[in-house]
C-alpha cells in the first residue's frame, strides 16, 4: 500500500502539506480529493451532511445542549473548582469531537483542534490545591446501533501523573479500534477532592423559623 505524501499540519487551520511538491490544501479540499468526501462522492462537508440519513443526525446530540446540562463546562471551570455538598467527585466536560471509521490519521486530524483545551484543563487541575485525583471519560455514539454511552479512557491518577493529550487519544483509539464506525462527541474529566475540602450534605430535617428580634 502506497504511503500518502500528505502531512496534517494541525492547528486551527487544519491544512495538509505535501513536502514533495510544496503544495498545501485546506482540510475540505484534501478530504474532497483523497479522504472521506471522496468516498461519499460529496464536494463539501455541507453537502455530505445533507446526505446523512435524518435518523443518524437525530442520534447526534446538540453540543450546546450537552454542555448546557452540566453546571460547569470548559477548561476554565477547573480554576477554583470546589466540591458540591455531599459529593467527593465532580465532572467537567471539555470540547472534543472526532469520528472513527478505521482511519487513524482522520481521527487524529479531527482530534487535534482540541489539544489546547485539554492541555489547559490539566494545567488548571494541577494548580487547584483542592483536587487530589482525576480520570478522563468520553461519550461515544454508535450510529448503527443508535446508542450512546460514557466510557472511561483511563484510570484515576494524581494530577501530577495526568496523561498527555496524545496518551489520552491513544487510549480512546485502543478502546474503539474494533468498532466499524463510531463518533466521540465529548470528553469529561472527573476530579476527586481532598477530604479537608469536602462539604457535608445538606440536612433534610424540618426547618425552624428564626426567632423575630424584639
Image (tube, rainbow, N blue to C red):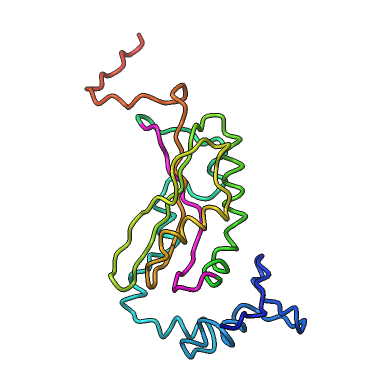
Seen from this angle, which residue lies furthest left?
206
Residue 142 vertical placement versus 128 (above, below): below
Where residue 43 appears, as percent x and y from the top left, is: 54, 89
Residue in the picture at 35% in, 29% down = 86
Where residue 63 appears, as percent x and y from the top left, is: 44, 62
Residue 99 vertical placement versus 77 (above, below): below
The quarter of the image holding the N terminus is: bottom right
Give residue 7's quadrant in the image. Answer: bottom right
The quarter of the image holding the C terminus is: top left
Q: Is residue 54 magenta?
A: no
User: Is 209 left or right of 81, judged from the image as shown?
Assistant: left
Residue 136 vertical placement versus 181 (above, below): above
Seen from this angle, which residue lies furthest front?
1
Question: In this view of the protein, which residue sits in the foreground, 142 or 74?
Answer: 142
User: Is 147 left or right of 185, judged from the image as shown?
Assistant: left
Residue in the picture at 68% in, 70% down = 9
Residue in the picture at 58% in, 69% down = 109
Q: Start and end of the magenta stretch?
A: 87-104
Residue 211 vertical placement versus 53 (above, below): above
Where residue 75 appears, as percent x and y from the top left, is: 55, 48
Q: Is residue 88 magenta?
A: yes
Where residue 77 appears, as percent x and y from the top left, is: 53, 43
Amino acid at each position: 500500500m502506497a504511503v500518502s505524501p500528505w502531512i496534517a499540519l494541525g492547528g486551527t487551520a487544519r491544512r495538509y502539506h505535501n513536502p514533495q511538491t510544496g503544495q498545501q490544501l485546506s482540510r475540505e479540499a484534501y478530504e474532497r480529493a483523497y479522504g472521506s468526501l471522496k468516498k461519499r462522492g460529496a464536494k463539501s462537508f455541507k453537502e455530505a451532511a445533507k446526505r446523512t440519513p435524518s435518523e443518524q443526525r437525530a442520534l447526534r446530540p446538540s453540543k450546546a445542549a450537552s454542555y448546557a446540562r452540566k453546571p460547569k463546562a470548559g477548561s476554565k471551570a477547573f480554576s477554583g473548582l470546589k466540591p458540591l455538598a455531599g459529593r467527593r467527585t465532580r465532572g467537567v466536560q471539555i470540547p472534543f469531537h472526532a469520528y472513527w471509521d478505521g482511519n487513524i490519521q482522520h481521527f487524529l486530524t479531527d482530534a487535534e483542534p482540541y489539544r489546547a483545551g485539554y492541555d489547559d484543563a490539566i494545567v488548571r487541575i494541577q494548580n487547584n490545591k483542592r483536587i487530589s485525583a482525576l480520570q478522563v471519560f468520553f461519550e461515544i455514539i454508535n450510529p448503527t446501533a443508535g446508542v450512546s454511552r460514557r466510557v472511561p479512557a483511563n484510570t484515576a491518577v494524581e494530577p501530577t501523573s495526568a496523561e498527555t493529550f496524545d496518551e489520552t487519544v491513544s487510549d480512546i483509539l485502543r478502546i474503539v479500534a474494533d468498532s466499524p464506525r463510531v463518533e466521540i462527541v465529548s470528553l469529561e474529566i472527573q476530579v476527586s477532592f481532598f477530604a479537608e475540602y469536602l462539604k457535608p450534605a445538606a440536612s433534610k430535617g424540618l426547618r425552624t423559623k428564626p426567632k423575630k428580634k424584639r
